[in-house]
Image: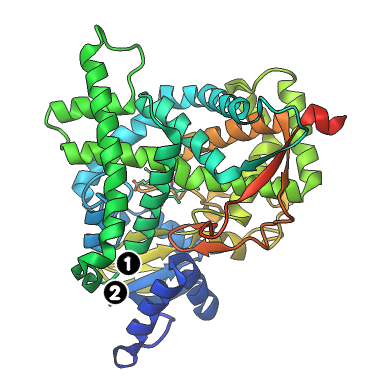
Amino acid sequence: TLPGPSFCLGIGPLISYGRFLWMGIGSASNYYNEKYGEIVRVWIHGEETLILSRSSAVNHVMKKGHYISRFGNKRALQCIGMNENGIIFNNNPSIWKQTRPYFAKALTGPGLRRTLAVSVESTRNHLEKLLGGHNTTSTCVDILLFLRAITLDISNRLFLRVPLHEGEIVSKIQKYFDTWQTLLLKPDIFFKFKWIYKKHEKAAQDLQDVVEELLLKKQQELQEAEKLHDITDFATDLIFAQTHGKLTADNVRQCVLEILIAGPDTMSVSIFFMLMLIAQHPEVEKKIVEEIQAVTGEREVQNSDLQQLKTVESFINESMRYQPVVDFTMRKALKDDVIDGYPVKKGTNIILNLGRMHKVEFFLKPNEFNLENFAQNVPHRYFQPFGCGPRSCVGKYIAMVMMKGILVTMLKRYRVHSHNGSTLENIKNNNDLSYHPNESHSRLRMIFTPRNQAAA
Ligand code: HEM
């Protein structure tokens, strides 16, 4: 039998579901793995749910073709437009199979090659806009807002290419994410009380409306253009697919929405954690800055440099391992199976607890932030921040390039410090749909000091 709390006349399922709603998905998963081991059976919404943090079990699920669906309340997914639309929580395998290739095309090949230059330019522009006019040695920056604006701008330049109001959209993306996180596992009864979830519905609708407007602008531009631009983009491909009846309008809008939120939801917080780790580990900063200087000198980072930025790469990997933003991923078994000797029924929900997996196996100093953890080659099965197999992160290559472009461009010019003595250990975090700082009470700030002035 599978380890985990006992059924006990239905009390076990009630308690475990309650724990997920109360603690958040990431925290509850860690609680159960810690208490019962690396393979645990609990219940969410009365459905059997496995929480896996043993690498053999996690890799089994990731690689097999019958775990290509996720789970979540259907009403919640309808409310945020993800039900059978888009890609991230599209639980209809045949529609998901139609949409994923559009993402794969945009996030690899020529798009991937342009990413570094676009990331550098966008980061430079934002740094100049925010800090350029200051003569003072240091500037206090609302860091998450800043990083979200950069990641949104990069995504827009790569995938949509229409003028947009960054501040307004960043705030709508955050509210959309909060809605997604709040509703995802709620019981059906919650949706019977419209007055309770009305504000969430509005938050989701607001972002959908903005994306609709952006798509209209894009369609207009395409109609007015005398010939197609040299570089086609994600949005253009989707609009053509809709014109040819291959994708519905709702699906196209949702795909554009998802490619725009993917960066601000994941990378901005990841880079924030990285900047905090740099601020807390001056010896690591020194190594990174020396490497950047040796490889790029006075010029901006280029694609041909990426292979040589080995310390930067180890630093990004170690940061994602030690302080992950995407701590787990959710799947559903579409067939009966056996995982690590345990029988698993079709329909079972699966949580792959990647963050914990990265701390319980293989690494030399699992509970420390230490670049030595990546000093030797790490076999893929022990380190999967983006997942692997058919439902892995389709943006994994582009995400690495964007993070390198943003970090290198910032660190070449600025030293970063935390504000008011905040450290990763003392800022409050939520570990629900993702692991991120709790921003409900105050905004997080960091101090940027120009390197030339810091040296003087
Ligand atoms: C630090 C950055 C990022 C991390 C750690 C991350 C991690 C992940 C993980 C763990 C998954 C689930 C994989 C699975 O179930 O096996 C995922 C899915 C996904 N990611 Fe990322 N991601 C990042 C950035 C991005 C970016 C920049 C994009 C696109 C611009 C992106 C697009 C997606 C999409 C579309 C999916 C859903 C794929 C599907 O369901 O078929 N991600 N990501």
Quarter containing the N terminus: bottom left
- Mark 2 nearby-residue class (10 Å; few <14, some 14–19, many ≥20): some
Most distant residue in the top direction: 226
Depicted 22 relative to depicted 218: above or below: below
Quarter containing the C terminus: top right
Residue at 29%, 33% (x, y): give it. Answer: 102
Q: Quadrant of residue 20?
A: bottom left
Query: Residue 380: x and y, percent?
Result: 54, 49
Q: 186 or 331: nearer the eye?
A: 186
Label 2: which secondary element: loop
Label 1: which secondary element: loop
Query: Residue 180: x and y, percent?
Result: 35, 56
Q: Amino acid at mark 1?
A: Leu
Residue at 31%, 36% (x, y): give it. Answer: 256
Residue 185 tag number? 1
Q: Is residue 417 left or right of residue 125?
A: right
Query: Residue 160: x and y, percent?
Result: 35, 27
Q: Quadrant of residue 69?
A: bottom left
Query: Residue 275: x and y, percent?
Result: 66, 44
Q: Amino acid at mark 2?
A: His
Residue at 43%, 48% (x, y): give it. Answer: 388
Q: 311 or 266: nearer the eye?
A: 266
Q: Are marks 1 and 2 in contact (CB under 8 Å)?
A: yes
The residue pinned by badge 2 equals: 45
